[in-house]
Image: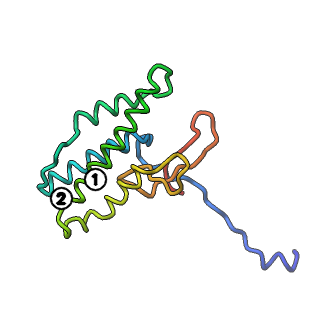
Amino acid sequence: MHPEAKNEKEVQIDTTVQEKNITFPTDAKLAKKVIDNCTKIAEKEGVKQRQTYKRVAKQHLRDAYFGHHPKRKKKAIMARKKLRTIGKRVVRELERKLPEEILKQYETEFSNYKKVLTQERNSKEKIYSLHEPQTACIAKGKAHKAYEFGTK
C-alpha cells in the first residue's frame, strides 16, 4: 500500500433523483393554477374580484394544448399569452385589494406567482410546480424519458 493512499478518502456521491409527484409543467397549466389559486385566496379573504376568469381560463387552457400542430399553432400561442395576461391581472388586483397585514401572509405565494408568469424558456431558477417550488428539471438523456422533475 502506498503511503499517500492512506490520506485519500473514498467519496461516494449519490445522484439518485427523488421524483416529485407533479404534472408535466407547461406554461399554460401553471398560469391556470395561478388564476385558480388567486380566486381561492380572494374567496377565503372575502375580497370581491372584478372577474374570476374561471370559464375563460379553462377554455384558454384547452386552446393552448397541441400547439405544435400547424393549424393550431397560432391559436395555442395566443391562448398561452392570454392566460399569462389574465394571471398577472388577477395577481395585481389581489395585491391592490388585500389589506396590508393579510398581504404579508401571502408574500411568498405572490412572489412565486409573479415568477411563474414572467419566466421564459431560458430563465434560470425556474418554478416548475406551485405546491413544490424547489422542484428542478433534471435531464436524463434517455429516449423514453428525457427529463425528470424532482430534487437530487
Badge 2 crowding class, 10 Å Cα cut-off, few under 14, some 14 to 19, many 20 or more, is few
Which mark is first along the chain, 2 or 1? 1
Circle 1 sits in a helix, a strand or a loop, which is it?
A: helix
30 is higher (above) or lower (below) than 56: below
Question: 45 or 88: which is nearer to us?
Answer: 88
Q: Residue at x 46, y 54 (%)?
A: 135
Which residue type carries mark 1? Val
For disc 1, the neighbor class at 10 Å (few under 14, some 14 to 19, many from 20) is many
The residue tagged 2 is 97
48 relative to 36 in the view: left or right? left
Q: Please indicate whether residue 145 sits to the left or right of residue 29 in the image.
A: right
Q: Which residue is mark 1?
A: 91
Residue found 30% across the figure and 43% down from its top: 86
Total number of numbered labels? 2
Camera-nearest residue between 44 and 134: 44
Q: CA distance from mark 1 to mark 2?
A: 10 Å
Q: How is the image coloured?
A: rainbow
Type of amino acid at the residue the image marks with label 2: Lys
**Relative to residue 142, is residue 90 depicted above or below?**
below
Q: Quadrant of the N terminus?
A: bottom right
Picture quadrant where residue 111 is located: bottom left
- x and y, in percent, of residue 134 in the image: 45, 58
Q: Mark 2: which secondary structure?
A: helix
Is residue 60 shown above or below 137? above
Q: Is residue 125 left or right of residue 49?
A: right
x and y percent of residue 139 in the render? 60, 46
